[in-house]
Amino acid sequence: MTTSPAAPTLRADAAERARTVAGRSSAALCVRGLDAGRPLAHATTTTGTTYVLVPTGGEVDAALAGRDDVTAVLMVSDRAPVPLRDPLRAQLWLSGWLTPVHPAARRAAVLAFAETRAVTPLLDVGQGATLLRLDVAEVVLREGERVTEVGPQAYGAARPDPLAAVEARLLQHLDRDHPEVLDLLRSRTPAGDLGPHDVVRPLGLDRFGFRLRIECPAGRRDLRVPFPRPLSCPGQLPAATRQLICAARAG
């Protein structure tokens, strides 16, 4: 008896997707009693600790004066790296308590932050920037119309997608220089023929495959083109992409 090959897994679990969104730089910080504002930077480290950088002497820093913590929500937005009608791909809400990092723990916290995201404001910690820890109690991920709750422990233990750091550059190159590759990738999906005015755009890339956006005069639709097997590092991407292109041409 022969068995059919298993269908490829199409995407990561919610915790991994949340950690991937958390790595985006666009964020807003909401503290009770204050207007929402943009932090200087934020990061969730490899050990699952979330840090937020705010200006020293700013509203958030002042709200913590004489207090152990304040309730807060960090909202991170994930936008496509190419121009689209609707570029917002996902939003992540991390709710919990903001606490100043104790001076004795500050150096280790800065190094852990920099390992995940090396940003210039880290050089000002202790002077013009204040480092805060967000003790996360609730994680909510919104992707389109889908809203998913993720357990804080699962979020902390997950890792972001291994292609996240190269995704923007590769999708911009694909969109700018290789429309014929986009058409070939689209042909690998069962979505039907393109209309005469439909445009294929790259929407996303992760270890499971490409995501395409079909922009139509009357709306849009999103398609996923999976790799034969999930990737573990960016170095595997060229061969996996060639495999998809060869299969599309052969088909």
Image (cartoon, grey):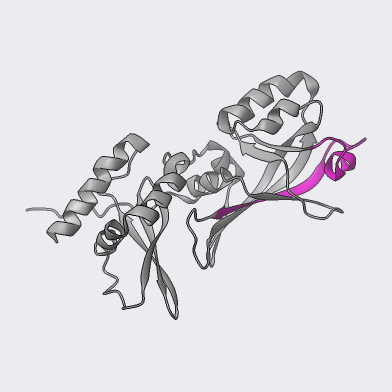
Q: Which one is nearer the viewer's eye here, 25 or 70?
A: 25
Residue 50 falls in image quadrant:
top right
Q: Is residue 59 left or right of residue 210?
A: right
221 to 152, vertically: above or below: below
Q: Residue at x 57, y 38 (%)?
A: 156
**Is 54 left or right of 193, judged from the image as shown?**
right
Please, which residue is most extreme toward the bottom here? Answer: 218
Above or below — where is 159 with respect to 113? below
Is residue 122 shown in magenta? no
- Report the magenta residues as a range: 55-78
The quadrant of the rendering that contains the C terminus is bottom left
Q: Is residue 135 visible?
A: yes
Q: Position of residue 142 (x, y in %)?
A: 57, 59
Image x and y of residue 248, in percent: 19, 58
In this view, the residue farthest toward the left is: 1
Residue at image location 56% in from the left, 42% down from the top? 23
Q: x, y (%) of residue 118?
A: 60, 30
- Tell me: 26 left or right of 63: left
Q: Is residue 172 above or below residue 251?
A: above
Within the image, what quadrant is residue 183 found in? bottom left
Please give the name of the residue rendered at 81% of the width and 31% of the height, measured from the top-left corner.
Answer: 128
At horizontal 39% and vertical 62% (from top left) the residue drawn is 201
User: Horizontally, is 123 left or right of 33 in the view?
Assistant: left
Name the outermost residue toward the front.
Answer: 177
Of residues 236 and 195, the one drawn nearer to the viewer in this rendering: 195
The answer to which image quadrant residue 64 occupies is: top right
Residue 69 at x, y percent in the picture: 83, 39
